[in-house]
Image: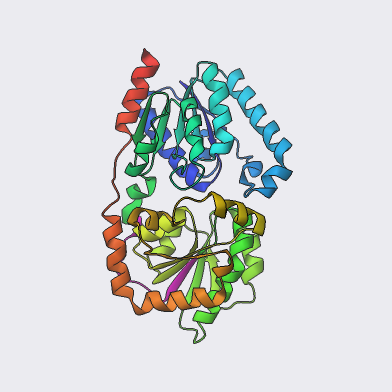
Amino acid sequence: MKIGIVSAEPSGDLLGSKILSKLKEKFEDLEVVGVGDGPLVQKNISTDREILEIMGLVDPILNFQKIINFRNNLIQKFIDENIDIFIGIDAPDFNFEIHKKLQKKGIKTVHVVCPSVWAWRPGRVKKFNYVDYMLCLFPFELEYCANVNKQAFCIGHPLLDKQKDFENDEKENIICIMPGSRKAEIQNNLEVMIDGFNQFNFEEKYKAIIPIYKEDDKYLIQDKIQKHLNITFANVESSEILKKAKAAVVCSGTATLEALLAEVPTTVIYKTNWFNHLVLKNLMMSEFVSIPNIIADEEIFFELLQSNATPENIAHDLNSNLADYEFRKEMIQAVKAKLEKTNLEFFCNRLYEDCRS
């Protein structure tokens, strides 16, 4: 059984690794081709995905032809390799065209992470028919998957399997700072996070630690923090820092779910260029941007977006989170209880039967 895969970012690498490990139990002779990083490197796939890290609305337009060429080369590679199944992880604007082309060739298509049509651009559900199997991370997403060609499954978020990694009763005077996993996110978010932490930490009672995922990020982060004595970075899993931290300042994304699992009161920020913000603001349907707030349907993590993401506001929310620590923790625990942990077994059985028929 030969599987093609495209994972655009670290959270996708984790998902892809989990799915492939489960499929290995069904398909003993499993070969993987495609693009990814992190734990997926063990599958001997390409790590050349810098073009997939381009974010926002302006940069993708400026690099449009490069992105199209990269995608077309991948499609041709999958066809030449005669893959049986294609798994696209997140990056729907990139992966759905691959689903479309490969499905026409009779290749089974799987998309992991349901596009957030409940939050913005609901018209994307029309493209769900290019996907044979949609794998959702949260139960509420299933109701948006009526257009899927065959079936949608809730597989649960892979971080739920790592819950024990986030558990620690002994908190230290640490603030976890997570500016994002992409270069553009680090460049847009880190400086204001640093300034906000320094305003909060004027008595120098706390230490800020930035977990880094990629070695390349180290030099970018190191350059920005070298003059700040109470801020450092660590090349470790983010859970190692979050489970010790009393509070966190994170870029909106998977990191907010990690903070939820670690039961850490968190300030969520997100900054992008003015054009991206203007367009996205008009497209957004959801009241909130962070996963915990969407699940809770209320703001348990204070969100500071764009011009509201100031050092003063970050410092103020850090102080509020620590002042009301036990109350905030109880709110977080209530939201955690809503998360439904499922497994991949039902999907793997269905895909196995489909491939045999």
Q: Residue at (37%, 14%) from the top-left corner?
A: 356
Which residue is at the far front? 282
Q: In front: 194, or 168?
A: 194
User: Is residue 180 shown above or below 82?
Assistant: below
Q: Residue 172 colored magenta?
A: yes
User: Is residue 188 shown above or below 68?
Assistant: below
Q: Residue 52 in the image: x percent, y percent?
A: 62, 42
Q: Residue at (66%, 28%) from the top-left corner?
A: 72
Q: Residue 131 in the image: x percent, y percent?
A: 46, 27
Q: In front: 178, or 276?
A: 276
Q: Residue at (55%, 69%) from the top-left corner?
A: 308
Q: Is residue 45 visible?
A: no
Q: In front: 260, or 25?
A: 260
Q: Quadrant of the C terminus?
A: top left
Using residue 345 as the reference point, say whether residue 317 is left or right of it. right
Using residue 159 as the reference point, say whether residue 272 is left or right of it. right
User: Is residue 146 shown above or below 160?
Assistant: above
Choose top left, top right, bottom left or bottom right for residue 82.
Answer: top right
Q: Is residue 58 visible?
A: yes
Q: Which residues are magenta?
A: 165-177
Q: Residue at (52%, 43%) from the top-left corner?
A: 121
Q: Residue 217 in the image: x percent, y percent?
A: 61, 57
Choose top left, top right, bottom left or bottom right for residue 71.
Answer: top right
Q: Residue 203 colored magenta?
A: no
